[in-house]
Image (cartoon, helix red, strand yellow):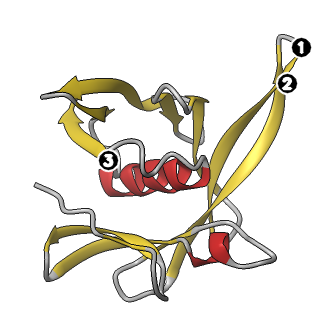
Amino acid sequence: PLFVPVRELEPPCGISLQIDEHCPLAWVHTEPLHMRRGGPPEIRRPDGTVFCSVLKEEYSEAGAVKARYVLRGTSGIRLCTISGDFREKAVNVADPLNRLVCATERRIINGLQYYQVRVGPRVDAGLVLCGLLAVDKIEGSSGTFTGPRAGGA
């Protein structure tokens, strides 16, 4: 199992991805979202160093302007792209070659709403989950759903 503690009331604000209460895998640093000038959330290593930033991009598709999120490493390289219907939790994650590596869908289990996450083989599931948690935070729906429910593909 994975644990996803959220700390938003005092600095450092963020969402942690952990194996247990003593073993962090990664940290979604959300403090920039709460600051006046704003800024993108960062996905950080357990030691606190920045691994990548979560950046919103707009693009046109069939005459409509849509949003997607790109995870960019500290060197500027695109690690993956997250796009889809964020409100409905129908989201796809693509690698730098635009190959599908993850898909999510809305699920209701025992009356609680979740989103199911299916991650492909040989994919950094921790990075994908952190990216999805960051996007969920940016989109303002963190209180609506109880969080991702990991599932294999």
Discs 1/3, front = 3
Nearer-N-terminus badge (3/2): 2
| Residue type, label 3 | Gly
The quadrant of the picture occupied by the N terminus is bottom left
| Dot 1: element | loop
Give the residue displayed 45% in from the left and 30% down from the top. 89
The residue that mark 2 highlights is 60
| Residue type, label 1 | Gly
Checking the image for residue 90, the label placed there is none
The residue that mark 1 highlights is 63
The residue that mark 3 highlights is 147
Who is closer to the viewer here, 99 or 68?
Answer: 68
Nearer-N-terminus badge (1/3): 1
Q: CA distance from mark 3 to mark 2?
A: 29 Å
For label 1, the crowd category at 10 Å Cα-Cα, with few meaning under 14, some 14 to 19 and many 20 or more, is few
| Dot 2: element | strand
Q: CA distance from mark 2 to mark 1?
A: 6 Å
Look at the picture and state if 104 lies above or below 140. Answer: above
Q: Is residue 19 visible?
A: yes
Q: Residue lying furthest top in this view?
A: 62
> Looking at the picture, how far across and down is residue 95, in whole percent?
53, 40
For label 2, the crowd category at 10 Å Cα-Cα, with few meaning under 14, some 14 to 19 and many 20 or more, is few
Give the residue displayed 36% in from the left and 42% down from the top. 145
| Dot 3: element | loop
Who is closer to the viewer here, 100 or 43?
Answer: 43
For label 3, the crowd category at 10 Å Cα-Cα, with few meaning under 14, some 14 to 19 and many 20 or more, is some
Q: CA distance from mark 1 to mark 3?
A: 32 Å
